Amino acid sequence: MLKPASVLGADLDTGRKRGTLMSSGTADEKGMIYKIARYAIHDGPGIRTTVFLKGCPARCLWCCNPESQRKEPELAKKVELCRTCPADALEWIGREITASDLLREVEPDRPFWRRSGGGVTLSGGEPLFQPRFVKRFLQLCREKHIHTALESSLFGDWKFLEELMDLVDFFQFDLKAMDPEEHLQLTGLDNRVILDNAARLLRSDKPLLARIPLVPGCNDGESNLRELGAFLERHRPGAHLEVLPYHRMGVGRYEELGRPYPLPDTLPPTEEEMERALGILKDYAIRVIN
């Protein structure tokens, strides 16, 4: 029996500081990010610049980016480097930045976006955890005619998501488990808000991609997969669903942060396990990709 994941008991915008006023009179909001990945090809259409925000209300047992969970900057220690230089082995993760400064950092990638039909993706962590910063940055992108994508768990206020509908060109979200109790055990969060937001988004006309990280022994049961397929078929027939095989590439990151890895004995799905899951999902009127 899996123990419930711990939950970050914080409000979606607690502690976020207001920034300085821009010339337009709009607050230049500050946010916390921990990485900018350039030339990304799996975070939306075309070649993208993905901004990873720090802070997430979920504690998914398989999370491969544990450095994204806490809102505050934190220190990581790379043990393998410590033998040669203790100073180089230490890394501060997380930095505060204004929306306008972030725009300046990503804009040099515009030629790659233009040639590939790409743009900027906000990922996490959880972007909805920093709503004012996210909204302001997306407004700036819209003013500059930059294609935007939002990668989210959809754990947030629908009213805020509605405010983003005209600012986000492409949505990407995970549906990790359909049963509320199972979802709570695996992520530390109740999924009723997530499913309600997902249903509303699926019924909209926004381009989107739903995903499921397939984790053996956690969410790969037939009942969960059938509930997922039926949910997508009901709210958007033909919806795209990407099945992502679980991997263990984040194990070292837990070690660097001095945290135990929650799934030490779980292995990636075999080819047969993946085929079984894909076969179940293909029974529904959705487009399954992997």
Image: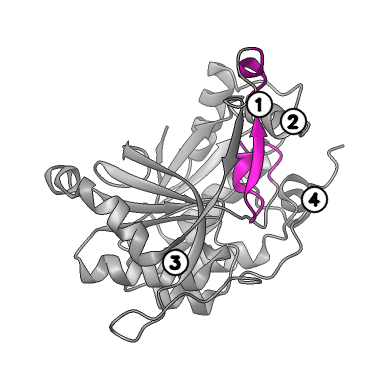
- Quarter-wise, where is residue 150 in the image? bottom left
Vertical placement of 54 versus 267: above or below? below
Residue pointed to by mark 1: 251
The residue type indicated by label 3 comes to Val
The residue type indicated by label 1 comes to Val
Vertical placement of 212 versus 145: above or below? above
**Image side of residue 102 versus residue 248, left or right:** left
Q: Which mark is residue 36?
A: none
Q: Does the magenta segment cover residue 74?
A: yes
- Quarter-wise, where is residue 169 in the image? bottom left
Q: Distance of mark 3 from mark 2, alpha carbons?
A: 30 Å
Dot 1: element: helix
Which is closer to the viewer, label 4 or label 3? Answer: 3
Q: Which residue is outermost to the bottom?
A: 25
Residue pointed to by mark 2: 261
Circle nearer the N terminus (3, 1) = 3
Q: Distance of mark 1 from mark 4, alpha carbons?
A: 18 Å
Going 67% across and 60% down the picture, which residue do you hit?
191
Residue pointed to by mark 3: 134
Residue pointed to by mark 4: 6
Dot 3: element: helix
Q: Which residues are magenta?
A: 60-83
Q: Distance of mark 1 from mark 2, alpha carbons?
A: 6 Å
Q: Does the magenta segment cover residue 153?
A: no
The residue type indicated by label 2 comes to Tyr
Going 57% across and 74% down the picture, which residue do you hit?
157
Q: Distance of mark 4 from mark 3, alpha carbons?
A: 25 Å
How many other residues sit within 10 Å of disc 3, few (<14), some (14-19) or many (≥20)?
many
Dot 4: element: loop
Circle nearer the N terminus (4, 3) = 4
**Image side of residue 220 versus residue 50, left or right:** right
* Foreground of the two, 229 or 214: 214
